[in-house]
Amino acid sequence: MRSFHCLCFVTLFSAAASIPALDLPDPTRTLYVHLSTDSQGRLLYSLSARGQTRLLPAPLGIKVDGADLGLGANLGPVQQARHYEVYPWLGGKNWATNDCWAFEIPARTASGTAWTLEVRVFPDGAAFRYHVPGRSRRLVQGESTAFQLPPHSILWFQTNLANHEGIYDHATPPTCPRLLAQTQSRSAWACRSPCSTPTAAPPS
């Protein structure tokens, strides 16, 4: 990971199993990642930009050694760091800019498993990852992470998985499962009602 020019740490809050909504902004406050929990203590995230919802609340979590770390997680003080750098780029432009707020949020499950959620928020996008420490063997069995699109979103997909050179079609999330059922192979952007899919995001 590249070094950054400015570093600061800010304690935002400490949370219990049922946490208040936490809003994580980008440096320009154009885009926000929102963290919360549902009535079962499931950690959720959503995303908004310019006052409009881009992703509806959806689960966060990774399954390690038989436990879903997104269930019943107690969150600790949030560490916030500013990342900014400009570097040469080979492509459609000569220079690229890495400009974001990075948030590290320590968490602990009811059984005592410690882990960290890292969220990076940029003016034009966001990303997150899970840090699960361990000195001995750990078994990662999958994850419960998903995303959920607003009903009016347009989803682009193609069903040619042999060489990924198929013609792209589009649909709204409510009609996505029905369209996929009409194809003989699964879509490259597979949807499960209500159009949630693990970790990846569809093209804009």
Image (cartoon, rainbow, N blue to C red):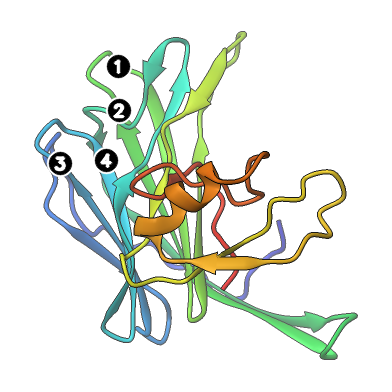
Residue 171, how many percent across, how many down? 48, 66
Residue 98 to residue 149: above or below: below
Residue 204 to residue 97: above or below: above
Report the residue marked by disc 1.
112
Label 4 to label 3, Cα distance in Å? 7 Å
Report the residue marked by disc 3.
38
Tell me which amino acid carries mark 1: Gly
Tell me which amino acid carries mark 4: Leu
Q: For residue 49, what is the image quadrant? A: bottom left
Residue 177 visible in the current orientation: yes
Q: Who comes first in sequence, dot 4 or dot 3?
A: 3
Disc 3, SS: loop
Q: Is disc 1 in contact with disc 2, using a CB cutoff of under 8 Å?
A: yes
Residue lying at 62% horizontally and 75% vertically, measured from the top left? 5
| Mark 3 crowd level (few <14, some 14–19, many ≥20, 10 Å Cα) | some
Disc 1, SS: loop
Quadrant showing the N terminus: bottom right
Between label 2 and label 4, give the one nearer the viewer: 4
Residue 101, how many percent across, how many down? 46, 70
